[in-house]
Amino acid sequence: MIVRFNIDPCEDGLYEYSVSFEGEDLYSDIGLNSMEACIDAAVEGLGQDAIAAELSYKGIISGTYPLATLAVAAAQVAGHALNTTLSIEEAGEEF
């Protein structure tokens, strides 16, 4: 199964995340101090059935990653998601 991690900023520089499968929310948390912390927490909560996760930051999907990659490279994946979202937001301002 491939799940989706939705990460969004919330107040005071904190983040929230939710994990869903086929549109159904599985679990979530709010008030984490970084995108990396959201990824780590989301991975930790998954069972054995999940093999990968699609990552969305502020509603923009940055990619689909094997769980092993998310577990060992959460900071790099978070950076990629942030850069992808910023690039798309900037491109949208041009139109």
Image (tube, rainbow, N blue to C red):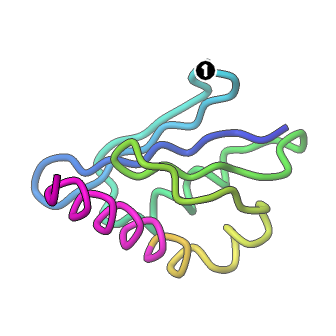
Q: Nearer the viewer, residue 83 or 93?
A: 93
Does the magenta-highlighted stretch encompass residue 85? Answer: yes
Q: Which residue sits at x=49%, y=37%?
A: 18
Q: Nearer the viewer, residue 52 or 13?
A: 52
Amino acid found under the numbered disc labelled 1: Gly
In the displayed structure image, the side of residue 61 where residue 71 appears, left or right: right
Q: Nearer the viewer, residue 7 or 92?
A: 92
Residue 71: name its quadrant.
Answer: bottom right
Where in the figure is residue 34, as x and y percent of width and height?
Answer: 34, 66
Q: Is residue 12 above or below residue 80?
A: above
Where in the figure is residue 17, as x and y percent of width and height?
Answer: 43, 44
Q: Is residue 5 above or below residue 88?
A: above
Q: What segment is highlighted magenta in the picture? A: 79-95
Q: Nearer the viewer, residue 27 or 78?
A: 78
Q: Which residue is mark 1?
A: 23
Q: Which residue sits at x=69%, y=56%?
A: 64
**What is the chief secondary structure element of the magenta stretch?**
helix
Does the magenta-highlighted stretch encompass residue 88? Answer: yes
Q: Is residue 49 above or below residue 35?
A: above
Residue 35: name its quadrant.
Answer: bottom left
Residue farthest to the right, as pictured: 49
Q: Is residue 6 above or below residue 69?
A: above
